[in-house]
Image (cartoon, helix red, strand yellow):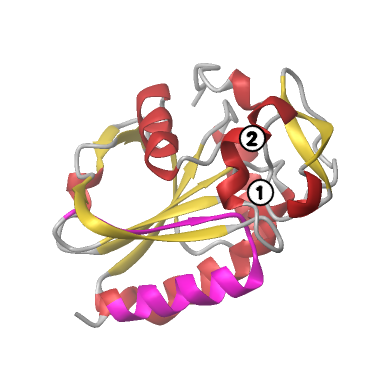
Amino acid sequence: MKQAPFYSRFRFMPAAFILGAMAGLAVVYGMGGFQRNAPVETACRPAADLAKKLEPLFRGEIAALTPAKTPIRVSSLSFRDADGRDRTLADWNGRVVLLNLWATWCGFCRQEMPLLVKMQGEHRDEGFEVLGLNVDDESIDEVNSFAQEMKLNYSLVWSNAKTTNELLRISKFQGIPQSFLVDREGNLRGVFTGANPANLRKMEDLVASVVSE
């Protein structure tokens, strides 16, 4: 399945910036072409001109967990599945969903995937599902090959510009990986950015809590 190159602005290349006493020197992913193996902190991030905007997120290993204080309905978010069908998150109503933004070239996406596999295996029978939302114009063959390599046990789907922009607006974070926990009624319950190990543990705990409700 050939995806339209809607997400070309997330083809990252490394750039460096200084956040003063707050975070020191950080190496980030900038816009306009990318190198797939460039170093980052805990997320594949955008260019230096976004640093000031994102300063509130910079703590420790540059990652954040934001629990949703006011319910946000996200059931209308749309994407395309591996068979080329248009789907919405409403198709998963009645299940707890972790919507994970990722791409095959994102090293920190790869880093968190064993936890996603673990949670899918542990909670599948409790009505939980991870949906890996690919945010680049990667082919189904490329994605399937990657899924086999990583032994992924959850569904992979393809985003579109509207859905990606809406999720980035919600998270206020211009990088990947990031994940959105949605309850059985289609309400957003948590937003997780980056691959900080401490925050991944918080994500695991919140998933278990929402699944048990």
Report helix, strand or loop for mark 1: helix
The circle on residue 52 is 2
The stretch of residues the image draws in magenta is 186-209
160 w.r.t. 53: above or below: above
Q: Is residue 149 visible?
A: no
Which image quarter holds the C terminus?
A: bottom left
Amino acid on which the number 2 mark rests in the picture: Lys
Identify the residue at the far front of this view.
21
The circle on residue 179 is none
Q: What residue is shown with label 1?
A: 146
State left or right for residue 12 relative to residue 85.
right
Q: How many marks?
A: 2
Q: Nearer the viewer, residue 198 or 123?
A: 198
Q: Is residue 41 visible?
A: yes
Badge 1: residue crowd in 10 Å (few <14, some 14–19, many ≥20): some
Residue at horizontal 66%, vertical 49%? 146
Report helix, strand or loop for mark 2: helix
State left or right for residue 77 relative to residue 61.
left
Q: Are marks 1 and 2 in contact (CB under 8 Å)?
A: no
Of circles 1 and 2, which is in front? 2
Residue at horizontal 49%, vertical 75%? 202
